[in-house]
């Protein structure tokens, strides 16, 4: 498969692909992975397994931030997409369609407090919609997020994130975008004081920050502070939603009904990009006043809506929920055993269901990532906390596959610890 895929694009070797990637695509990122010992150029992909064009196979527990919650090229999703393309294309974003209306209804019905769905093609775009909706609803401009946040790289979204991303392109705006430490309710309450904040936006578990988990009562406390000051609460569930915590949306288990919920990544099943901002009554008023106020040519593309509806249906099946419950228990037991064996290597476990960050204090996560890749598992370090390995098992993994992942993880951690 590797050679055939290379030749399809006119390449004779992996080296030629890397040379063009350096020259025409992204030289820094391409070189970074070679230096880190993860020279991955994905060829064949099926289920949770990826095969490099050179033949090296890995089990994927990075999942591109949850894009592949249900695996790569899930047969039901492939069939849904190929069936849909016999009749529709992306459609015209100005007009109602059966697929778009049906997906909007299913998402709203699955999201307590939501009334309307506004579609995009990426999580960042949906975050922009959420921020604009909050500003319209409140008549205010201020947005509060957490330190080392990540909500995408689009126009407004990037200003809510870490300064590494916002300052490079002069997109930071301290006058309107404030950041406070995660799990610090006093700091959040102080930031909300006054009458200038339109919304607080937070991931239920901040992924790119390394999955620090919310302390008991923290998110509910933030929601109460929002209610007290008239700000809206935006739950970014792009990475933590769609069943990863054991619930469809993790924020509700924290005692919070958000004013706006954002979803993306896994909603498209890894086959067609689709995202959504699910707006409650306070945030959706602009759709009654001027439905043309936000437009996105590819937002709610009909092909994407077909796939997303099937993703939602598979994710909500009783057998999927039961499998997630079993995998959570299996992974929790395996990680606890590994930490008991190597407490000086694996120094901490941050976990909400299958949203997991593994802390490696002495070595950091990068050596573990590299050794794990050699052992045949792909997991990525956290960009904004390199001591933490993002560890995100898929929702449909089997018991033997999960055992295989845990065995390879144990081998990798042992090897890194022995040379640390």
Image (spheres, rainbow, N blue to C red):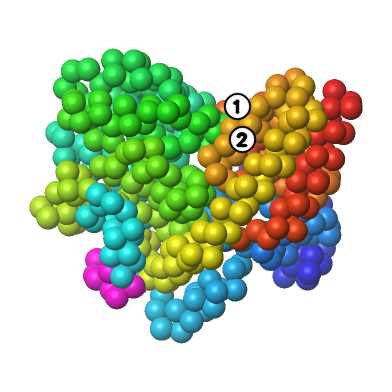
Residue corresponding to mark 2: 357
For residue 58, above or below residue 34: below
Could you tell whether 142 is left or right of 124 in the image? left
Q: x and y percent of residue 16 in the render?
A: 79, 54
Residue corresponding to mark 1: 385
Could you tell whether 97 is left or right of 122 in the image? left
Residue 266 appears anywhere in the view: yes
Q: Residue at x 45, y 79 (%)?
A: 84
Q: x and y percent of residue 186 in the render?
A: 34, 15
Could you tell whether 390 is left or right of 305 in the image? right
**Residue lying furthest left in this view?**
289
Q: Residue at x 18, y 26 (%)?
A: 228
Badge 1 marks a residue whose secondary structure is: strand
Q: Residues within 10 Å of mark 1 (few under 14, many from 20)?
A: some
Q: x and y percent of residue 196 in the render?
A: 19, 23
Badge 2 marks a residue whose secondary structure is: strand
For residue 164, above or below residue 98: above
Instruction: Magenta stretch: give its range.
Output: 93-101
Q: Is residue 383 magenta?
A: no
Gap in Å between the C-alphas at discs 2 and 1? Answer: 10 Å
For residue 320, above or below residue 281: below
Numbered label tally: 2
Most foreground residue, 225 or 76 = 225
Q: Is residue 95 magenta?
A: yes
For the C terminus, the quadrant is top right
**Residue lying furthest bottom in this view?**
86
Contact, CB < 8 Å: mark 2 with mark 1? yes
């Amino acid at each position: 498969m590797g050679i055939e895929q290379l030749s399809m694009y006119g390449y004779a070797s992996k080296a030629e692909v890397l040379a063009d990637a350096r020259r025409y695509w992204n030289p820094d990122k391409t070189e970074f992975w070679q230096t880190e010992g993860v020279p991955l150029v994905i060829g064949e992909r099926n289920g949770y397994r990826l095969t490099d064009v050179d033949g090296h196979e890995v089990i994927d527990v990075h999942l591109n931030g949850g894009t592949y919650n249900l695996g790569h090229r899930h047969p039901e999703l492939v069939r849904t997409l190929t069936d849909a393309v016999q009749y529709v294309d992306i459609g015209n974003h100005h007009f109602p369609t059966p697929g778009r209306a049906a997906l909007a209804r299913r998402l709203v019905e699955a999201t307590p407090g939501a009334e309307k769905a506004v579609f995009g093609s990426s999580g960042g775009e949906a975050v922009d919609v959420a921020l604009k909706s909050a500003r319209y609803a409140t008549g205010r401009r201020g947005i509060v997020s957490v330190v080392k946040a990540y909500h995408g790289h689009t126009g407004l979204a990037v200003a809510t994130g870490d300064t590494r991303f916002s300052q490079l392109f002069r997109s930071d705006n301290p006058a309107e975008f404030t950041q406070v430490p995660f799990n610090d309710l006093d700091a959040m309450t102080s930031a909300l004081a006054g009458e200038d904040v339109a919304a607080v936006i937070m991931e239920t578990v901040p992924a790119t920050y390394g999955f620090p988990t919310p302390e008991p009562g923290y998110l509910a406390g933030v929601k109460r502070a929002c209610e007290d000051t008239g700000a809206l609460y935006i739950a970014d569930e792009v990475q933590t939603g769609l069943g990863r915590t054991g619930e469809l949306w993790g924020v509700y288990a924290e005692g919070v009904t958000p004013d706006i919920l954002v979803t993306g990544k896994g909603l498209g099943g890894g086959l067609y990009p689709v995202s959504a901002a699910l707006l409650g009554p306070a945030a959706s008023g602009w759709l009654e006043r001027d439905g043309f106020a936000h437009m996105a040519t590819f937002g709610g593309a009909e092909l994407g809506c077909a796939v997303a509806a099937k993703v939602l249906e598979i994710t909500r099946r009783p057998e999927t929920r039961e499998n997630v419950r079993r995998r959570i228990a299996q992974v929790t037991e395996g990680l606890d055993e590994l930490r008991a064996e190597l407490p000086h290597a694996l120094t901490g476990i941050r976990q909400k269901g299958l949203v997991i960050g593994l802390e490696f204090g002495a070595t950091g996560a990068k050596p573990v990532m590299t050794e794990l890749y050699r052992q045949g598992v792909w997991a990525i370090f956290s960009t904004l906390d390199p001591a933490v390995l993002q560890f995100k098992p898929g929702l449909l993994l089997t018991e033997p596959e999960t055992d295989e992942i845990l065995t390879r993880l144990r081998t990798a951690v042992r090897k890194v610890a022995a040379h640390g």
